[in-house]
Amino acid sequence: TNTYAPTEYLEKIFTEAISEPDVVALSIATRPDCLGNNVLGLLEKLNKIKPVWVELGLQTIHEDTAEYIRRMYPLSVYDSAIENLHKIGINVITHIILGLPNESKEMMLESVKYVGDKTDGIKLQLLHILKDTDLCDEYELGKFDVLTIDEYIDILCDCVEVLPENVVIHRLTGDGDKKLLVAPMWSADKKRVLNSINREFTKRDITQGRKVK
């Protein structure tokens, strides 16, 4: 949560980073509920030096899921953060997790559609179950299943298709620490995952005309 500190400290470290000649933009990942007026003022100031992007960890629009994963803020806080950041000319990238417990494909697509109308970019992330977490305990008790690789790629394709073309896709998947990963184990084979995504995207002509990083 890279805005959860005194503004004076944030200004020091962000100014140091943005002043480097080779740095072309500053990307700050944080929570929507950690963007007070002082922080927004600092970000506006920095954005006049070089472009500033703010990444917001939303994960889902569904309040029951948000409570389950202990996100600790309502959707309205995200909405306000987006509005405040856009008012000062800052681009926003939103993080969404696919495969959260008890969410259907339709629910995941609802989250993607919702943020697609608000955000400038999106990062889509597969849910990973890691050792020594409450989520791992629930998984091992059989309280929910994880996505198969085919299910994930099918959902991923549909997510890309429902996003407006102006929304830049910054991530299609991610990696869990292999030493801690419990499930889904197929996600540890990065080459297989990327090749499978590329094949299905090519088959369905998913990225035609789209910006995918």
Image (cartoon, rainbow, N blue to C red):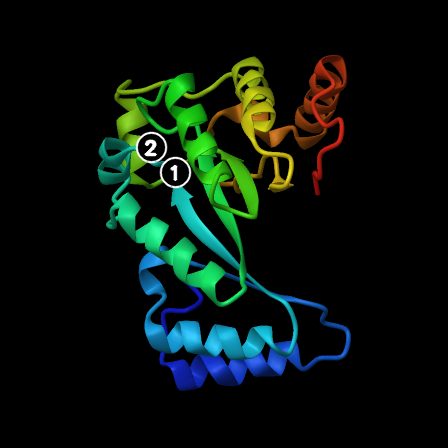
As drawn, 175 above or below 52 = above
Question: Which image quarter: residue 160?
Answer: top right
**Where does the N terminus fall, quadrant-wise?**
bottom left
Residue 109 visible, this orientation? yes
- Which quadrant: the C terminus? top right
Contact check, label 1 and label 2, Cβ < 8 Å: yes
Report the side of 199 relative to 39 (left or right).
right
Label 2 SS = helix
Residue 152 horizontal/vertical position (percent): 53, 21
- Disc 1 residue type (three-letter): Lys
Give me the residue at 42% from left, 35% from top: 114
Residue in the image at 67% along x and 31% along y: 190
For residue 131, the mark is: 1
Q: Give how far across and how far down residue 7 sits, in percent.
A: 39, 81
- Decide which of 183, 211 is in the foreground and name it: 211
Percent of width and height locating residue 143 = 26, 20
Q: Is residue 105 left or right of residue 210?
A: left
Amino acid type, callout 2: Cys
Q: Nearer the viewer, residue 208 or 95?
A: 208
Circle 2 residues within 10 Å: few <14, some 14–19, many ≥20: some
Camera sees residue 99: no
